Amino acid sequence: MTSDGGQRWGMTVPLTGVPLPEHPALYSELADLGYTDVWSAEATAGDGVVPLALAAPESRLRLGTAILPVYTRGPALLAQTAATLAEAAPGRFILGLGASSNVIVQNWNSVPFERPYQRTLDTVRFLRRALAGEKVTAEYPSFNVSGFRLGVALQEPPQIMVAALRPRMLALAGREADGAILNWLSPQDCATVVPYVREQNPDASIACRIFVVVHQPDETAAVMPRLKQMVAAYLTVPVYREFHRWLGREKALSEMWDAWARGDRKGAVAAIPDEVVDEIFVHGTVDECHAGIRRYIENGVDIPVLAPFHGGAELRGILAALAPR
């Protein structure tokens, strides 16, 4: 919730099809429309820092990373990055961290993807000390730090949130951090996931990236193949595969997983049931999309972070249509 008790409403940035130099003006438009948050990510496109730096002058927006991986920046550099963004947007920055996946960490960045739970735990504990201004010398189970003191004095350290999928990491997010960041799940899945966080901390924040596609009813058949390609690309990654097994989708997705393991990419996409797409994507008319977003909120999400699949000339209209009501 916002300071006045209103509902937070986030947007994933950078926005598709909008050159970065145009983003500062667009951030002001988002604030005018009632959006309260912008959240960045790191995968194959922009990094998670520069888009937020461009948003920092817009004082009506809160900034968050969802997420910065705990492996691809060293502990000290993570502290410096967080402190710099917190200084640029005092009281308006949330550091979202996560283990990421073996694909991003190991395959693309050549960093061993080992002991992700421990690495995340150690990073959060180190950052709590470093962002509070302590000089840190410590041997953590997954890394060591000797004599680091942050050179930026923060009046207010940023909140830390942790991307989490299954019970152990969800509990860590509630116990050690200020909340959890969710991704690739349905509203009903949130009802399963959120209690693991709130059992540790009833006041923990829950952010969730929600993939949104606005389309007319007669366009559903054309939209489905694109969404199924995304499902195949993400839910075959080991961390997400195990997440959805735990959520109870093994029967629905086993044929996709088997085809993917054989190298049959087309067969994997074709094997995905429409029902799975309908569960984990918000799509349809504007009214249907608003109703879908609200279902996440009803199941425990404090900060819906929309990720619309639109670019070009139609983007601004979609942003206005999806703005909070």
Image (cartoon, helix red, strand yellow):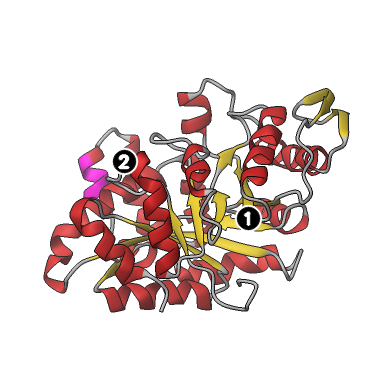
Q: Residue furthest left?
A: 218
Q: Is residue 268 magenta?
A: yes
Instruction: Provide the secondary structure element on which disc 1 rests.
Output: loop
Q: Is residue 313 magenta?
A: no
Query: Is 36 positioned to the left or the right of 198 in the image?
Result: left
Magenta: main secondary structure:
helix
Residue 198's spot in the image, x, y percent? 70, 68
Q: Please tell me how crowded label 2 is: few (under 14), some (14-19), or many (20+) other residues with Cα within 10 Å.
A: few
Identify the amino acid type marked 1: Arg
Q: Is residue 300 visible?
A: yes
Residue 78's spot in the image, x, y percent? 66, 34
Q: Residue 19 has which mark?
A: 2
Residue 90's spot in the image, x, y percent? 67, 51
- 259 and 161: which one is in front? 161
Query: Is 145 positioned to the left or the right of 100 in the image?
Result: right
On screen, 36 above or below 240?
A: below
Please report the residue visible at 71 percent of the width from the left and 30 percent of the height from the top.
Answer: 75
Q: Is residue 115 visible?
A: no
Identify the amino acid type marked 2: Pro
From the image, which quarter does the C terminus lie in? bottom left
Instruction: Provide the secondary structure element on which disc 2 rests.
Output: loop
Please report the residue visible at 36 percent of the width from the left and 40 percent of the height from the top.
Answer: 21
Task: Give the residue at mark 1.
Answer: 92
From the image, which quarter does the N terminus lie in? bottom right
Identify the magenta region. 266-270
